Image (cartoon, helix red, strand yellow):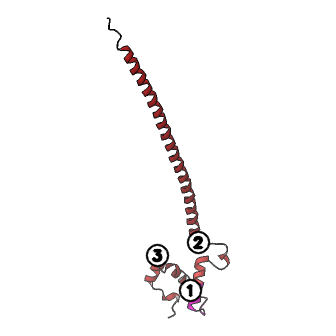
Amino acid sequence: MPLFHRSSVSSSDRSSIDDPNTHHGHRSSHRSSGSHSSRGSASPSSRHSHSHSHSIFGGSNSSRKREDPSVSAAKEQVSRAETAEREADRALVASRRAVREAREHVRRLDEEAKIEARAAKMKQDQVKSITQRARPLGRHA
C-alpha cells in the first residue's frame, strides 16, 4: 500500500487529524482531503511539498492575495509588541515626570517649612525679649 494513499489513514488517525492539538494534524488534514488523488505519479516528497504549499497559501493562484495565518499572527504579535513598547515608553516618561514633580513639591515644602521655622524662631526671640522687659513691671503694686 502506498505511503500517502488516502485509504491508509485509519479511524484512529482521522481523529488525530481533526484534533488541532496533534503534531501531524496540519499536514494530515490535507492528505485526507483528496488533493493528491490526481497526482498519482508524483513522488511522496513532491506530494508533501505540494500539500504543504496548499495548506499555507490555500492554492497556487491565491498565494499572493492571502497571507499565511502564522505570518499574519506573527505580524499582529509584533504590532501589539510595538504598541505596548510605545505605551511603556509613554508611561516611563510620565513616571519620570511624576517623580520629578513630587521631588520638586517636597523641595518646596521643605523650603516653606524652613522659612516658617525661621519666622517662628524670630517670633520666639521677640516674645522672649518682650517677656524680659515685662518682668520688672508690677513691683509697685
> In this figure, which residue is indicated by the disc labeled 3?
19
Which of the 4 quarters of the picture holds residue 37? bottom right
Who's the residue at 40% across and 20% down the image? 129
Neighbourhood count class around disc 2 (C-alpha, 10 Å): few under 14, some 14–19, many 20 upward: few
> In this figure, which residue is indicated by the disc labeled 2?
71
How far apart are labels 2 and 1 at the CA level? 21 Å
Q: Secondary structure at mark 2?
A: helix
Give the answer, above or below, for where 18 lies relative to 85.
below
Relative horizontal placement of residue 116, taking residue 53 as reference (left or right): left
Return the x and y of residue 5 as percentages of the image width and height.
52, 89
Earlier-in-chain disc, 2 versus 1: 1
Report if residue 65 lies within the magenta region.
no
Return the x and y of residue 112 as percentages of the image width and height.
48, 34
How far apart are labels 3 and 1 at the CA level? 20 Å
Does the image show residue 110? yes
Q: Residue furthest top?
A: 141
Q: Secondary structure at mark 3?
A: loop
The answer to the question of whether label 2 and label 1 lie on touching residues, with beta carbons closer than 8 A, is: no
Q: How many marks?
A: 3
Q: Secondary structure at mark 1?
A: helix
Report if residue 42 lies within the magenta region.
yes
In the foreground, 128 or 60: 128
In the foreground, 135 or 94: 135
Residue type marked 1: His
Return the x and y of residue 121 as percentages of the image width and height.
42, 28
> In this figure, which residue is indicated by the disc labeled 1?
48
Residue type marked 3: Asp
